[in-house]
């Protein structure tokens, strides 16, 4: 390490302040940025409190009181859970299908629900509903394609596949280019349609190198996302 | 879907061998205690009210994360909880495959203890929603993890993007002592394994987590505008299967106060933050260099920025004059719909 670098870092550690050295030395500029992050993180930490009972327990132990050991053993015991039968009953109830009892309860609940204030549906719900009603199949393909039921090929297709090689080759020569063209058209149409449909009442942009997540949620994002510190800008 | 746990699981035992198991005591001896739930029958322990919050223990855990398109992360941490709300999580060391700036990482972990303990690991946070959104099955094996007899389970999300878990659940306590999370296409997303497990040490020897974000849980999760005395946005269109879990206010250490709405689908949390009135000026705090980056340089403009952070999506910005952030392990479209549904 150069003397200038060492001097800059010593000065910064003594009294954090920007210096011109950071302009000419990328290493020291990076070093300073990391230190600033450390200081910010340290400043956010609260000072741990010594457990209230620690002083009393130290005094008791020093005085030869061995009764605390029984207390320690008791506090380390496993907390018992609810009886298994109760949990089984709860699971049965969750999985239970509609029954006469449910119908009766439904009738009892209906007047109570009717007395509640009616809240207007949010505009986004209305928009999504309109989109789905206007083109239900397209909407489902676009947003929930992973949950669509996979259909098996019809028997007629298998019979056709058993036709002569010549006929299939001819069909491939004709159908393959057509299918490719249709697929490309579909992709373009979906892309154009997607752009037109996602009109939120606010501008949506993707994060760039200049965008930084707020410090409030950056650690949370990194923890939920399972990425190392600093990965979430 | 990866099925090869063979090298990871330590020992596979016969399912019938676990009627009684060894429980370590504080002095290192072992005692015989009856199992709460016999393997192969009854309600699995992880379906009980989050054993992580109620079972006092200490453990050394190995954690591995494999985000798509980014560097992985693997390390060990020590966890201690008294089963009554107090806990401590401290990183121990990085693993060889991980390229960590350990100092920064340790600071992040220590300043995020609360998040880590409450939200990171697999846990059934709401049994009813879990039953609605996930299906589970026993794999018919009992194995040893950190010397504890555990039953293996497979968990699948019913709807939405593919997501599944494989779990090893302590037969006696219901704690999840090992888990693997799989995402789209069966790709492994995360893995957690207890390497050591024991009773919680004496309270006097533990420095428990001290909340630093001034979190105040609100008494009611609805009618927030009336409770807080200012206009509060409440999303009305949530990702499929999610429901409101908690409403609270938090501080960010820079003089700002935020409304924090926590949603979950039984397992995964999702957060919605709205900045409330500024309680102190940054200048008054004397923090020139740790001033948080402004969310939006043009606050008058309704604009949000989408960040993809590993398995999570975060969206932040200003909409109609409200500063908002939402974050969760769901798709971008779902989070944008959520924001739109919150607007008055």
Image (cartoon, grey):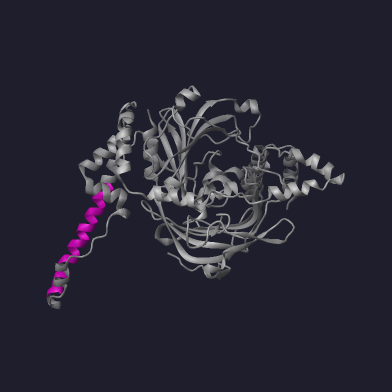
* Viewer-side residue, B160 vs B23: B23
**Residue B294 spot, x, y in % from top left:** 52, 34
B247 over B145 or under it: above or below = above
Query: Position of B85 compared to B246: left or right?
Result: right
Query: Position of A222 compared to A108: left or right?
Result: right
Query: Position of B262 compared to A41: left or right?
Result: left
The residue at 51%/28% (across/down) is B276
Range drawn in magenta: A167-192
**Residue A48 spot, x, y in % from top left:** 71, 40
B197 is within the stretch colored magenta: no
Res. B323 visible in picture: yes
A191 is within the stretch colored magenta: yes
Query: Position of A209 compared to A146: left or right?
Result: right
**Residue B84 spot, x, y in % from top left:** 62, 43
* Viewer-side residue, B266 vs B84: B84
B289 over A95 or under it: above or below = above
| Quadrant of residue A113 within the rendered picture | top left
The residue at 61%/28% (across/down) is B282
Main SS of residues in magenta: helix
* Viewer-side residue, B261 vs B33: B33
The residue at 32%/42% (across/down) is A102
Res. A199 visible in picture: no
| Quadrant of residue B183 within the rendered picture | bottom left
């Amino acid at each position: 390490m150069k003397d200038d670098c060492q001097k800059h870092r010593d000065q910064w550690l003594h009294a954090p302040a920007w210096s011109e050295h950071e302009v000419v030395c990328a290493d020291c500029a990076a070093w300073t940025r990391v230190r600033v992050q450390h200081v910010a993180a340290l400043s956010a930490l609260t000072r741990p409190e010594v457990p209230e009972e620690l002083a009393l327990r130290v005094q008791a132990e020093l005085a030869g009181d061995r009764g605390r050991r029984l207390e320690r053993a008791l506090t380390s015991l496993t907390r018992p859970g609810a009886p298994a039968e109760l949990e089984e009953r709860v699971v049965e109830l969750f999985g239970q299908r509609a029954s006469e009892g449910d119908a009766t309860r439904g009738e009892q609940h209906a007047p109570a629900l009717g007395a509640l204030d009616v809240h207007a549906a949010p505009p986004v719900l209305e928009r999504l509903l309109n989109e789905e009603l206007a083109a239900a199949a397209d909407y489902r393909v676009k947003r929930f394609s992973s949950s669509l039921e996979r259909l098996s090929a019809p028997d007629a297709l298998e019979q056709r596949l058993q036709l002569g090689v010549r006929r299939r080759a001819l069909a491939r020569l004709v159908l393959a280019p057509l299918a490719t063209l249709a697929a490309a058209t579909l992709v373009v149409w979906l892309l154009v349609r997607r752009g037109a449909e996602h009109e939120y009442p606010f501008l949506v942009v993707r994060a760039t190198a200049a965008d930084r997540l707020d410090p409030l949620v950056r650690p949370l994002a990194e923890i939920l996302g399972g990425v190392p510190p600093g990965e979430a800008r | 879907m990866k099925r090869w746990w063979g090298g990871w699981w330590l020992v596979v035992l016969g399912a019938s061998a676990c009627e009684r198991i060894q429980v370590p005591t504080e002095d290192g001896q072992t005692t015989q205690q009856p199992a709460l739930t016999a393997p192969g029958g009854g309600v699995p322990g992880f379906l009980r009210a989050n054993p992580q919050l109620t079972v006092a223990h200490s453990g050394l855990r190995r954690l591995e994360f494999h985000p798509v398109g980014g560097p992985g992360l693997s390390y060990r941490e020590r966890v201690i909880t008294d089963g009554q709300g107090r806990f401590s999580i401290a990183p121990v060391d990085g693993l060889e495959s991980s390229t960590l700036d350990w100092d920064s990482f340790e600071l992040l972990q220590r300043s995020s203890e609360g998040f880590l303990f409450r939200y990171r690991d697999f846990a059934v946070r709401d049994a009813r929603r879990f039953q609605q959104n996930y299906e589970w099955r026993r794999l018919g094996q009992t194995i040893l993890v950190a010397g504890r007899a555990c039953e293996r389970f497979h968990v699948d999300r019913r709807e939405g993007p593919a997501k599944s878990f494989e779990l090893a659940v302590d037969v006696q306590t219901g704690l999840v002592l090992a888990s693997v999370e799989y995402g789209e296409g069966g790709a492994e997303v995360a893995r957690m394994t207890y390497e050591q497990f024991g009773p919680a040490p004496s309270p006097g020897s533990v420095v428990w987590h001290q909340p630093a974000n001034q979190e105040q849980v609100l008494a009611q999760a609805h009618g927030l505008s009336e409770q807080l005395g200012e206009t509060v946005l409440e999303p009305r269109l949530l990702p499929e299967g999610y429901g409101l879990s908690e409403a609270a206010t938090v501080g960010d250490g820079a003089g700002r106060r935020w409304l924090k709405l926590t949603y979950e689908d039984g397992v995964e949390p999702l957060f919605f933050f709205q900045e409330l009135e500024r309680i102190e000026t940054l200048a008054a705090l004397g923090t020139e260099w740790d001033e948080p980056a402004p969310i939006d340089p043009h606050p008058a403009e309704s604009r949000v920025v989408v960040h993809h952070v590993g398995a999570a999506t975060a969206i932040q910005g200003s909409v109609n004059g409200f500063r908002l952030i939402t974050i969760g392990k769901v798709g971008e479209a779902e989070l944008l719909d959520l924001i739109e549904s919150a607007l008055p």
